[in-house]
Every structure is written in structure tokens, then in C-alpha cells.
Amino acid sequence: MNKDLQRIPCFLYEEGVHFALPPALKGLRRVYSRFVLRSEDRRLIPEPTTFRAVNRPEDAQVFLFPLDLGVYTDSGAATDMGRIVGDLPYFAGRERRHICSDAGDRPTTIPQPASIFATSVLRNGPRNVIPTAYVLPEHSRAQEASFDWRAIRYDVSFVGNATHPVRRALITSIRREAPQLRLLVDFDTSVVTGDTVCRHLPQSPEEQQRRQAMFCRSLRTSYCVLCPPGLGPQSIRFYETLHAGRIPVLIDNDSVLPLEKNIDYKAFCCRIPRTHVAHAGQFLASWLAGQTRAALRERCILACRTWNTWFSDARHNAALMRIILQPGEA
């Protein structure tokens, strides 16, 4: 079968032709949907392994909004962006077939019945908001998974910022209650100005590259990686950990992970109950004590296999499209 026949006919809206941003939103950082790429001539195109671009809306099976909503929803402009999406020329009557992405940290998105693929989704949220993985940054994407177990130096690691109080509580508990664990922790220079506010200080390109390299090195040298929430209920670190073939340590909360009907997350994750955060050190030490070295390595391999099966770009996009085109399959 011709591969083109397997791709979804897609109509891509164009800014300045089909919609316009108000002046107040034009100054915000421009981020494009996870389903959009730039062609060699710098034009925006639908991601080509999943979609086949069409010029006539009557030929389209889905309609793609090109801008990621996250910058706008995190900035408090969800209502304004919802109005823009609702006013798209082909929206009425095709709401569910309109695809939007929201990589924002907060579980609030536009008030429209489009198919919204978001990285921060709560269980009691709207049914049309579908959980999706974060898109990995280049420095993480460039690192191949390593299963050289001789390189392991730590039981658990965390390299990042302290944007959420639970991150500091986790580290404090592990240091106090599980000193026998080999722990690597490196917080950056972010300034926490309260229980929920974190101000990121500017970093030089050299410092940013140094910390990115340190984070990638921590993945290679640890069995487990702490993946607590940040400003939102999920963290990109969870997906970076899967990509690297390491065991994510999650805090159970009300968030929904992508493709939960397809993926057995408990097979390769360590999940700390929300009620145990203050004693996470005890919980994690007990969990690790119950794992053989062979079991830890199997979980690492399964985490990487899960990434390759479900979260690589083309495969994840295809799985997400099945949710809206064949709802009973999700």
C-alpha cells in the first residue's frame, strides 16, 4: 500500500490568513504545535509521517492549529486563545476534528471542544483534553540510551531546579531517612521566593551547556531519577528518563499519563504515594531494597522500550491520532 494513503489528510491553518493574534499576545514567545514542522524553505507544514497536507478544507480529515497554546495559557490568556480558535473559519461543526497542542505547565487550557493534546492533564478535567508526552529538548534527544551498568554510580539522582516545594521535601527526606542510598543532587541557581514561586536567574550559554551535560551524565550513572512535578502536575524529566532507559520516580497525584490504557507504567516506574512525600526517603529505600540488581536493569530496559514503542515522535503522534479518529481504541 502506498504510504501516502496511510497518512491523515490535514488542513493547516495559517496565521495572517485564517487568524490573527491581538497585539497583547504578539509579544509572547512563539512556539509551534508538536504536530508542526518547518520545511526546508522555512514554511510550516504538518508533521509529514502522520499527516498529508491538503489545500481544500473539504478534503481534510483533521484541522491543525499551528501555535502551541502553552505559552498563552500559562500567561493567563486561555480565554483569548479560545476565542481565536473558536473563530477559525472551519471550526463550527468540526470541533472534535480540530487539533490543538498545549505544552504548558498548568492544567488549564482553552475553553473550546477541540481535540486538545496537553502535557498537564488532571483526572477530573474536560474529556476533550488528552494527555500527551513532552517534546524532548535537543540535548536530551541527542543522548542515546546506555546500558553499560558499570557506569552506574548512584541509586537515585536529581539535577534541576527547585520550582516546586515537593522537590525540596523529597531531597530533604532522602538525605535524612535514607543516608545509605547513593544520591546525586544538584539544584541550579533558581531563587525560591515562597512555597510555590521560583525565579530562574539568567544563565550564560556556557553554564546552560554545562548543566545540560551534567543532567545527561546523571541519567547515565543512576538507576533511578526523581521526576517530581514542577509548576504543573507533570515534568519533562519523566520523558527524558524513559528516553535514557532509567527508572522514573514519580509522586502520585491527580495527573493523567499518556496512553494509560496501553502502557503498564507500574512495570518500570517507582511511584511514591502522595501521602508519603514527607517520608519519601523511607519509601524509596524500602522499594529499592525489594529490587534485585537484575530487576532494576530490567525496569531500565523496559522504560527505554516503552519510549521507543510509544513516545518517539512519529509513533506518539500516530497513537494520539487514533484516539480522536477511533475513540474506542484509546
Image (tube, rainbow, N blue to C red):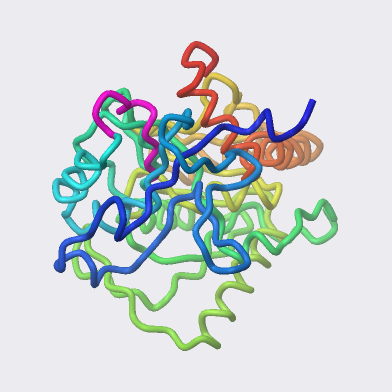
User: Where does the image place residue 289, in percent across and percent down from the top left?
Assistant: 65, 37
* Placement of the N terminus among the 4 image quadrants: top right
Is residue 214 toward the left or the right of residue 250 in the image?
right
Q: Residue at x 14, y 46 (%)?
A: 79
- Please tell me whether residue 41 is drawn above or below residue 304 in the rendered image: below
Which stretch appears magenta? 91-101
User: Where does the image place residue 216, in percent across and percent down from the top left?
Assistant: 65, 65
User: Where does the image place residue 26, in percent across and percent down from the top left?
Assistant: 23, 68
**Depth order, front residue of 202/9:** 9
- Please tell me whether residue 320 is drawn above or below residue 218 in the rendered image: above
Q: Which residue is drawn at 82% across and 51% down?
A: 147
For residue 99, which quarter of the picture? top left
**Depth order, front residue of 35/177:** 35
Q: Is residue 201 magenta?
A: no
**Depth order, front residue of 102/241:** 102
- Please tell me whether residue 128 is drawn above or below residue 277 in the rendered image: above
Q: Residue at x 58, y 72 (%)?
A: 212
**Depth order, front residue of 179/36:** 36
User: Where does the image place residue 257, in percent across and percent down from the top left?
Assistant: 47, 33
Is residue 193 toward the left or the right of residue 180 in the image?
left
Residue 42 visible, this angle: yes
